[in-house]
Amino acid sequence: MERLDKVLSNLGYGTRKELKGICRKGLVKVNGVVIKDSGAKVEPESDEIFFGEEQIFYRKFIYLMMNKPNGVISATRDNRDETVIDLLEMNHQIFDPFPVGRLDKDTVGLLFLTNDGELNHRLIAPKWHVDKVYSAKINKEVTESDIVAFKNGITLDDEYLCKEAKLEILSASEEESDILVTIQEGKFHQVKRMFQAVGKEVTYLKRIEFGTIKLDETLVEGEYRELTDEELAILKNF
Ligand code: URA
């Protein structure tokens, strides 16, 4: 059971003080009965709550998939730059979501946002080796020997030995290569640093898969949607 004013304020229907007045005026009904005490206890997930004419659908957690655009920070707040949270509509921002892990400012593609701290913790914990697939452009020719090096484990500039990574070459020339790379970890700037280790530079980076969940390509950069029940079940079972 939760306090009625807490449930309503969490959903953005006003401050506790405002809700006290609103309830006193008889504007809130629970299971067909006017509730004048804003501190009354309700079962938010099963009680039928009306705010005026509008029925309230309460839920504790939200789970979103965004196609992150270039130039936006994967954080909840930033003094200078726009964040992924700034791109959300108010009715999603009120849940206080945060990004699951981070993509660099110039990386685009699949990013989850949630306010479910436990799920977030599990997904980014180093002991869970969730495969992440990136599509990238590289400034030089990517070769078979790079594939072998990635498979054997790249050593980063801080001596960290990466787990086996799968590198696929889609096209390669001396000036530019298109590749897909699957990594299991999420070290800071990992893909960029892995290519640096073989003397090459990432010029474009997009995450296209997380576990078996693929970026919904109908989302243009900057757009997002809620996860489907199926996608959520997959995330929760990692
Ligand atoms: N690897 C990177 O270098 N950057 C990202 O944003 C994600 C993976």
Image (cartoon, helix red, strand yellow):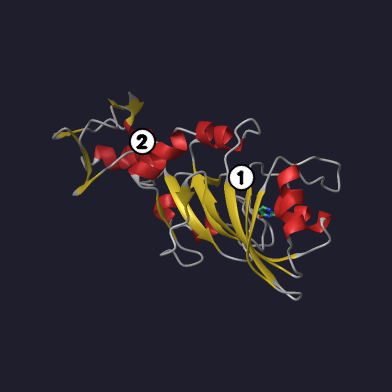
Could you say where residue 25 lies in the image, as x and y percent from the top left? Answer: 23, 42
Q: Which residue is drawn at 86% across and 44% down?
A: 158
Q: Nearer the viewer, residue 5 or 232?
A: 232
**Residue lying furthest front in this view?**
144
Residue 17 appears in the picture as rendered? no
What amino acid is found at the position of numbered circle 1 in the picture?
Answer: Gly
Residue, far bottom: 175
Residue 206, image x, y percentages: 59, 61
Q: How crowded is mark 2: few (under 14 residues within 10 Å), some or many (20 or more)?
A: many
Q: Which of 119 and 31 is in front in this view?
A: 119
Q: How crowded is mark 1: few (under 14 residues within 10 Å), some or many (20 or more)?
A: some
Residue 5 image offset from top left, x and y in percent: 35, 35
What residue is shown with label 2? Answer: 7
On whether ligand 1 comes within 8 Å of the CB at mark 1, the answer is no
Q: Dividing the image into four equal quarters, which quarter contains ligand 1?
A: bottom right
Q: Quadrant of residue 198?
A: bottom right
User: Which amino acid is tagged 2?
Assistant: Val
Which circle, 1 or 2, is nearer the viewer? Answer: 1
Compare residues 37 and 45 and report the one nearer the observer. Answer: 45
Pick whichever of labels 1 and 2 is earlier in the sequence: 2
Which residue is rendered at x = 54% and y = 58% of the image?
Answer: 86
Q: What element carries label 1?
A: loop
131 vs 92, left or right, is right
State which quarter of the image contains the N terminus. top left
Q: Is residue 61 left or right of residue 154?
A: left
Residue, disc 1: 101
